[in-house]
Image (spheres, coloured by chain):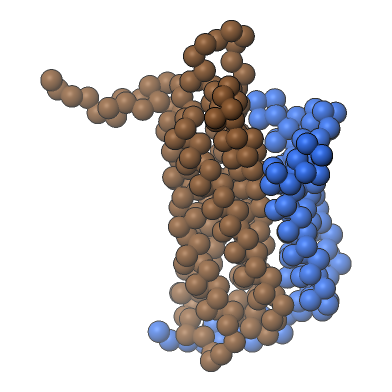
Chain colours: A brown, B blue
Amino acid sequence: MEITSRDLLTVMHGMGFGALFMLAFSGALVELYRVSTPGPPPNMSSREHALFRLYLGVMVVLAWLTVFSGAYLIYPWYRATPPAGLADLSGFPRALLLSSPRTSEWHNLGMEWKEHVSWLAPIAMTMVAYVALTYGRGIIQHRQLRIAVLTFAVAAFAATGVAGAFGALLNKIAPVRGGTPITLMESER
Amino acid sequence: MSVSPNSNKANVDTANMPNGPGAAAILAAGIGSATLGILAVAADASPAINSMLNLYNPAGALSGVTTVTIVAWLVAWLVLFRLWREKAVALARVNLAAFAMLAIGFLLTFPPFMDLLQGK
């Protein structure tokens, strides 16, 4: 059972960082809504508050790791230019997609959108975490802060959804290939 | 679950905080979003700008688009924070501006809209 170094890094980018970040949204959105909803005093102990701080902090780190690993590790392999006259473009995903009108929109729409819109998520999420953690439960005194935090959190979720969905589809249609083989398991037979 | 004395104290302290630091972060996030969209369109429309934003050749203009965006966002945040850290600002207006810039960021990174703007 083998994978390549590029497979491994692509999985880390998409599943290790991106998917984990996306999964964390469900908890973050519920907790942000709960913390910022006017009502009775919160039942949040200092330990739970510390956990929420850690949760948002980890989300911010995951968001930045996702976009940086995508732009500076995976994307260069995706957009590499093939040598002139090369018939087999399977090692050059961008060129492979653009070589046929049946697949070119996967690049022109999918990758072009994904590579830019994904950067809205870490910017928005950093702001959300900063405001939520700076004001804590005191945010209930600031209705407009609550509105902004929830709006930007939903926007970050939407941007991540677009990037994640196109990332998964692009990697299905024109996967990044190559790199050093890594043997995970070997059959004894 | 219980309410600890510490968390109550923190609630009182944060409730009296001015909204300026939060407003600075919100508006800066909007500025970062709009910068991303504007630079994405500029790099797509102009070969000269595309070349200028090519800071790291393997990643192409994306490297410059995102680097300049991050710098603009952080500088805006720092400046606004210094201006507003002890102030109460008109947050409804700040939000309106930030949401408009966030929408600009989304729109200008959407390839069909980018093409529409360029008459493609």
Residue B37 location (% of width, % of height): 75, 48
Residue A156, position in %: x, y?
61, 58
Residue at figure coordinates x 50%, y 20% from the top left: A91
Q: Residue at x 60, y 35 (%)?
A: A105
Split into 4 quadrants, where in the image is the N terminus of chain B? Answer: bottom left
Residue B75 visible within the image: yes
Above or below, B42 against A178 in this view is: below
Residue A77 in view (yes/no) = no
At a point 82% along the width and 73% down the height, the residue shown is B93
What residue sits 51% from the left and 47% below the top? A165
Q: Is residue B44 left or right of residue A153?
A: right
- Residue B15: image location, x then y, percent: 67, 84
Using the rendered view, name the quadrant where residue A189 is placed.
top left
Residue A4 appears left or right of B118:
left
Location of residue B119 (image quadrant)? top right
Give the vertical position of A69 relative to A51 (above or below): above
Q: Residue furthest left?
A: A189
Seen as rendered, the residue at the extreme bottom is: A40
**Where the C terminus of chain B falls, by quadrant?**
top right
Q: Position of residue A169 (x, y in %)?
A: 48, 40
Q: Between residue A13 and residue A114, name the one nearer to us.
A: A114
